[in-house]
Image (tube, grey):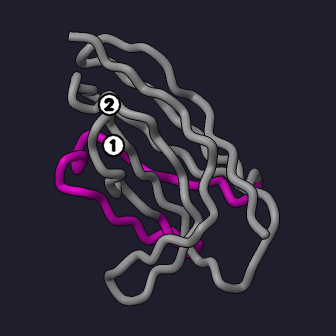
Amino acid sequence: QVQLVESGGGLVQAGGSLRLSCAASGTTSSINAIAWYRQAPGKQREFIARITYGGTTKYADSVKGRFTISRDNAKNTVYLQMNSLRPEDTAAYYCNAGIVRGSFYFPSNYWGQGTQVTVSS
């Protein structure tokens, strides 16, 4: 079993920054990566970024160059540094524990409760 708890969301003006945290506990051999997703009202949940236990990262084109995913293995925490935020980044942000095979990320059923990010124009 894996438990994930997100934090760090809030209200920020366009152009501002936020750092989200995803604290993980528990282990399972079927997991080798953590990913961030987001879901805006009326839209499907979309992949944002992922990082493997070895530190390999991948980003969605919509956030590449603005968001950075990182991890602190000692704290079992994954971070999402979000810079140059735009109103279209407004969404609930979720972390997920999953598996990377080749260039693909396969999400598991382990999700956090989400944290809201609102970017005002």
Q: Are marks 2 and 1 in contact (CB under 8 Å)?
A: yes
| Amino acid identity at mark 2 | Asn
User: Residue sitting at 59 percent across and 77 percent down?
Assistant: 32
Question: From the viewer's perspective, is residue 69 above or below residue 8?
Answer: below
| Amino acid identity at mark 1 | Phe
User: Residue 48's x, y, as percent?
Assistant: 34, 53
Question: From the viewer's perspective, is residue 110 above or below residue 99?
Answer: above
| 58 is within the stretch colored magenta | yes
Quadrant location of the N terminus?
Answer: bottom right
User: Residue 34's x, y, as percent?
Assistant: 54, 63
**Mark 2 secondary-structure assignment:** loop
| 9 is within the stretch colored magenta | no
- Displayed quadrant of residue 96: bottom right
**Residue 83: image tag:** 2
Question: From the viewer's perspective, is residue 64 above or below residue 118?
Answer: below
Structural crowding at the residue carrying mark 2, measured as other residues with C-alpha within 10 Å and reported as few (<14), some (14–19) or many (≥20): some
Q: Which residues are magenta?
A: 51-74
**Camera-nearest residue between 4 and 39:** 39
Does label 2 or label 1 sit earlier along the sequence? 1
User: Residue 118's x, y, as percent?
Assistant: 37, 20
What residue did someone put label 1 on?
67
Quadrant location of the C terminus?
Answer: top left
Q: Is residue 110 left or right of residue 37?
A: right
**Camera-nearest residue between 24 and 41:** 41
Q: Is residue 114 left or right of residue 73?
A: left
User: Residue 117's x, y, as percent?
Assistant: 42, 26
**Camera-nearest residue between 121 and 16:** 121
